[in-house]
Image (cartoon, rainbow, N blue to C red):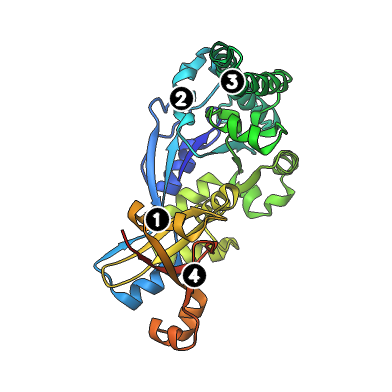
Amino acid sequence: MKLGIVGLPNVGKSTLFNAITNAGAEAANYPFCTIDPNVGVVTVPDERLLFLRDMYSPKKYTPAVIEFVDIAGLVRGASKGEGLGNKFLSNIRVTDAIVHVVRCFDDPDVVHVEGGADPLRDIEIINLELILADMEMVERRIDKAKKSGKGDKKFLHEAEVFEELLAHMNDGNTARSYDCPAEDMELIATSELLSLKPVIFAANMDEKSFSSGYEKNAYYQSVQLYADANGSQVLPICAKTEQEIAQLEDEDKLLFLEELGIAESGLDRLIKCSYSLLGLISFLTAGSDEVRAWTIKKGTKAPQAAGKIHSDFERGFIRAEVVAFDDLKTCGTMAAARERGLLRSEGKEYVMKDGDIVNYRFNV
């Protein structure tokens, strides 16, 4: 999974990126201190995988990972090249989802390119630039479909779908908010539109308002209302606090979180948000050779999940031997789970569940 961290300059993007990846990206109080995207890879915390590691003492341990891309601050006119906007927009195109950092604090010592904090205005600026960039792509797609059409119903329908989408976007709406039949949305999804990507709004607050109860922050409240109305998620966060947390050892980190009255770090909460937003789950494989987590979409059937490991597993799928993690943990060993009938044999129609521990049987 690849997440792009976007926002206006000086809203805390690079500070947050540094905190969640420990990558040491430059964070400074001036616009465009990030030119080329910084990339950081973090492992997905999973206590289930740690349990299996202790059980099997494998030669190899492979948790799931998320790649974060810190994309330079966008400004008005980015879709027309302002502030190196075209380059920055292309960096967003390769991500699975957008983490949109929105400034939810006032500070005269931290420059804001628009003159002061106003989260909804900032969101609309970014949205507009994504929409304008998308409209150019949609217009090109319409032209291509019409040229390829020449009486072909498939291409004529494609042109109609994108013309209706273009009209929707002309009113300042994102592709994400376009309501159409599922088959038409599948067609639209092939165009890699920026404003089609799911969004998590990271509501970045100062330390005082975050620690004293972020729900009372008026800026946060406005972002939450906007997200609810637009099918997005909100992550309340203080980038400065997260940076402090990131510099602590594990035990000190837990104590610090406890003092703040926070159950989880921003990274852990962001990962959970990301999995929920993208409809992802993890299944696990375990043995003396390797303990590993595999990320799949909710609703994936056993053979397609097997294909994540190797195409031969999907092609020659016979059955999946499955035990739920909680059942294995209760039993203590795989042999005990088998004796109690908790190790199941599942066929091609089995829909994978989060935390399934699987051994595939196949023949090629």
Q: Secondary structure at mark 1?
A: helix
Q: Residue at x 54, y 18 (%)?
A: 78
Image x and y of residue 226, in percent: 73, 38
Question: Sequence order check: which comes first, mark 4 or mark 1?
Answer: 1
Q: CA distance from mark 4 to mark 3?
A: 41 Å
Badge 1: residue crowd in 10 Å (few <14, some 14–19, many ≥20): many
Comparing labels 2 and 1, the label whose residue is closer to the camera: 1
Q: Residue at x 58, y 15 (%)?
A: 149
* Depicted 353 relative to depicted 11: above or below: below
- Amino acid type of disc 1? Glu
Q: Secondary structure at mark 2?
A: helix
Q: CA distance from mark 3 to mark 2?
A: 27 Å
Q: Residue at x 60, y 35 (%)?
A: 186
Which residue is identified by label 3? 155
Q: Are marks 4 and 1 in contact (CB under 8 Å)?
A: no
Find the residue positioned furthest to the left.
59
Question: Sequence order check: which comes first, mark 2 or mark 1?
Answer: 2
Image x and y of residue 143, in percent: 57, 12
- Amino acid type of disc 4? Glu
Question: Sequence order check: which comes first, mark 3 or mark 2?
Answer: 2
Q: CA distance from mark 2 to mark 4?
A: 43 Å
Which residue is identified by label 2? 90
